[in-house]
Image (cartoon, helix red, strand yellow):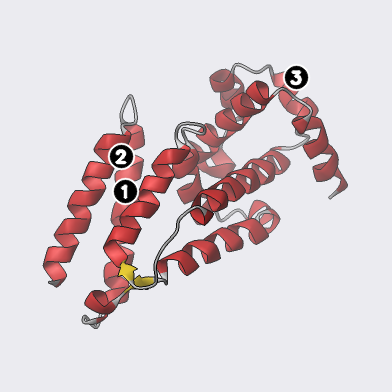
Amino acid sequence: MGEGQSMNEKFYSLKKEKQDKMLNGAMQIFALYGYRHASTDEMVRVSGVSKGLWFHYFESKAGLYAFVASYGLKYAMIELSMRTVRQGADYFALRYEVEEGKMRMLDKYPYLPLFLDSIAREDDEEVVEMIKEPREKYAEQLQQLLLQADYAPLKAHDDYLLLIDMLNYTLEALLANGYRSPVFSKERYLTEVQKHIQALKKLIA
């Protein structure tokens, strides 16, 4: 814990531009490869920040992952908290709004949406324990937001939970495919999201 506190203090003493370069470099590599296969050498390459500085501010890859994941989750929670949703809002419209919110994150942290999906799947016992609290808080906040929606059209189907899972898996795949393109297009992604949501709505109508 002491390492994390001193690390935070040292890191936040950097200029914001340098902080964001390092955060973005780490988010990109962790998002693309997961904790186990992420290489700090790749983070150095994509961020343009020297390896010496990385190890000055982060004493281990696990500590780096925990810091960046917690930072990303907290940033995403702030974005979620800005959503004003009326009770009984259309579930599909609200689900689309969540994806719109993810796209707003791209301007500052281009790989954060993909990293959030990666964090949810991460299963390395050491780092999962380190990020347990912010990961659970983010999942709970997202759930509470979506629970304000009207589920009546979905609940008319016995397998409505499977339909929600199917939509979640589909959107996760669309996001991953978007990142495989040379340049991620927010507009293209949201268009595909809308198409798939509309297709599901037609199926259950």
Q: Is residue 186 left or right of residue 128?
A: left
Query: Is there CB contact under 8 Å for labels 2 and 1?
Result: yes
Q: Is residue 126 left or right of residue 6?
A: left
User: Quick one: label 1 or label 3, which is nearer the N terminus?
Assistant: 3
Tell me where residue 170 sits by quadrant: bottom left
Label 1 neighbour load within 10 Å: few <14, some 14-19, many 20+: few
User: Quick one: label 3 or label 2, which is nearer the N terminus?
Assistant: 3
| In this view, 37 is above or below 126 | above
Q: Is residue 36 left or right of residue 153?
A: right
Q: Nearer the viewer, residue 205 or 29?
A: 205
Residue tagged 2: 177
Label 1 is placed on what type of residue? Ala
Label 2 vs label 1: CA separation? 6 Å
Residue at the spot 36% in from the left edge and 49% down from the top edge: 99
Residue tagged 3: 52
Query: Is there CB contact under 8 Å for labels 3 and 2?
Result: no
Task: Determine which of the numbered discs, if any, sits on residue 197 in the image.
Answer: none
- Report helix, strand or loop for mark 3: helix
| In this view, 20 is above or below 1 | above
Tell me where residue 160 sits by quadrant: bottom left
Label 3 is placed on what type of residue? Gly
Residue tagged 1: 173
Label 3 vs label 2: CA separation? 34 Å
Residue at the spot 76% in from the left edge and 31% down from the top edge: 11
Tell me where residue 85 sits by quadrant: bottom left
Label 1 vs label 3: CA separation? 36 Å
| Coordinates of residue 187 in the picture (x, y in percent) | 27, 36
| Coordinates of residue 61 in the picture (x, y in percent) | 69, 38
Q: Nearer the viewer, residue 167 or 101?
A: 101
- Report helix, strand or loop for mark 2: helix
Label 2 is placed on what type of residue? Asn
**Quarter of the image that includes the C terminus:** bottom left
